Image: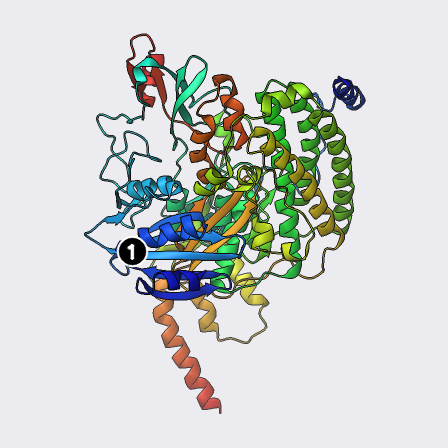
Amino acid sequence: MVEEIRKQFPKMLITTSSIRGNTWLIELSKENLPAVLEYAHNVQGGNLLTMVATDRVDIEDDYLIDYVLGWYELGQILVFRAKTRRGEETFNSITPFVPCADWYEREAKESLGLIPVGHPNPRKLLMADDWPDDLFPMRKGFKVDTQVPKKETSSFPFESPENSSMFNIIPYGPYHFAIHEPIYFRFHADGERIVGVDLRAGFNYRGLEKIAESRLTYENIPFIAERVCGICGSVHAEAYSQALEGAAGFEPPERAKWIRVAMLEMERIHSQLLWLGVASHMVGFDTGLMQFWRVRDKIMGLAELLTGNRKQYGMIVPGGVRRDIREDKRRTALQVISEVQMEYEELLGAVLGLDTLKKRLIGVGYLSNEEAKKYSVTGPVARASGVSIDVRRDFPYEAYGSLEFKTPVESGGDVLARTLVRANDVLESIKIMRQVLETLPGGPVHEPIDYIPPDVTSVGLVEGPRGTDAHYLITGRDNTVYRWRVRAPTYANLPAAKLMLEGETLADASIIIGSIDPCISCAERVVVVDLRSGIEKIVLGENLGRRLS
Amino acid sequence: MSEMIKLLMLGIKNGRVTYRYPTEKKPIPEGLRGRPEIGFEECIGCGACARQCPPNALMVEELDDKWKLRLLYGRCIMCGLCEEVCPVDAIRFSQDYELASLDRGALEVELELRRVKCEECGAYFTTERALEYTLSEYDELTYDIDVSLRKMIHLCPECKKSSWSDASADAYRRIKDEQ
């Protein structure tokens, strides 16, 4: 891919260098960035994995703007890097041609004060509405224990469709009984039909990346990385460890690699069973919820046996894993996996045969193949729209290269297709889990990493239950990271929810949002919309407290 | 319709799988990381656990003659790093997972140790127990090291630095003389 881009833009690339086996770094000037990225994403079909802005004011007096694109079919990752000097905190936005860059660029604006010029919609994304406009948390000068003053007046400019006065505004969230984590959707509804969607995310912004670079050491971060998500914790720990080990040029011991795969697959089985249960509940099929979660509890018991915790395993650390799988535990695990497979297949056969359930899912929340590519969605959402991408298969990490499995792909593009992809995922994971437990190689499970060179850029990719989890890392000095950026799969999938929701009915909104398996957490304010008068009031946390007391 | 009957049969076959908590408890496997417990007798006050703790659940406070370790269970994420780094196995993860409490104080443990003064400048620098531990480790070493080096354990890091250079010069001279 490097060659093709060089052929297309012979004069624009400043340097190209290989960071790691499949990762290349391409440096170009700030002005050429949009043209090259438009070609790479729209013509060559690269998937936008992450975009990171880094403040390097303390070393080089500049900012780095890195777009990371991946080509799954080629197994290549390209980091497009541009620099901007201190004093000119702007860069050219690529969102007009590459819509999936929307959130990333808004985040760069908010967290580093880099203005994306030409961005169609530079609203707040992560920070609270009353966060001051001139305070940028990811800048190096910002101390992690800063007492942040609140802005006096605050509001969020929501988007409205044309003739919006004709439609009802239906607020959906941040606390809503049909979505299990805080995100605020705002629907403009014409009767039952959704005609306009806008969403406000960022209720759960905890500043983990800032804590990591200012307070934690390399060894601490995997545990904080696990807490990025309550369900796919190991995925984040693995992606971080992979990025760090890549930067250090370190290979974990063979047995550790296999145990890592077992952890990741155990988590995938758990997550997909959890989702199948929640999705059943969302369409009013509570028998499904109870039965899927009955099977799921066996996996949680297995996790407890192997790792010491039911969730947040705390197993994967840079250098290997923390606990070995003993012989007796291995045999118990194999037995549990067989039981789970038997019960799951029996249950799935019954559930998928239900016509009433199918009718709720067929043709709902459609996302076409072209849109899926354009929005760089990942995981089951992409695979349900016929985009066959899977990090396990395309960028084989750990022991996946020597394992046999299939990647379930559906072409329907609707909620049913996404359900089938996840349902078949469980069967494949069970297959992988059995292979791992049967052929676990011997040897040590952890080796210390001797030396981690500073200022190395590295990307770690892991296929989580929800899609590609991309961790970007720049190593630093004194045993700490210089920049760590987490791109959870939901970050890529959530902007596409807008496309799925438009034109659907309000009753289906819950299952459509649910079908991307969003992973969000922690709210801090409530929005009240008075429909009759059309007056909106945003109630801040403090006012709410006052009213209640 | 037949699927509905299948589901019904599944439900009847598997019956009730939940436990009547809290009267009936699920058996827990060995190796569960429950509530961490500090061994008040064993702890030497080195502070390694507090340095490693990712969420700052363990915190060290150094007052003049006192060294305080606080453990806030509300913050603990049960990662087990403290247990790993403790040189004397003073922190152990118990099998107790029921951490809910109506009393905030019940979720907090505090340990206090006495600190010792530097024999040279008189500043407090380490705990009594850490000093004892260092001395016992030192005695286990079979090297026949000069007594003046042994004394250095009683000095604070600053004084240690300055006297180290003197002592090592002395030792070097003596070895030269013997040769």
Quadrant of the rendered structure where residue A195 is? top left
| Quarter of the figure with the C terminus of chain A | top left
Q: Find residue A108 and report its horizontal and vertical position in percent.
A: 32, 44
Is the residue A44 above or below the residue A378 in the image?
A: below
At x 51%, y 49%, the residue is: A222
Point out the residue furthest to the top here: A532
Judge left or right: residue A23 versus residue A13: right
Residue positioned most to the left: A87
**Front position in the image: B169 or A324:** A324
* Colour mapping: rainbow
> In the depicted view, which residue is nearer to us: B6 or B44?
B6
Q: Secondary structure at mark 1?
A: helix
Residue hosting label 1: A32
Residue A194, visible in the rendered structure: yes
Is B83 left, or right, of B24 in this rendering?
left
| In the image: residue B20, left or right of residue A381 | right
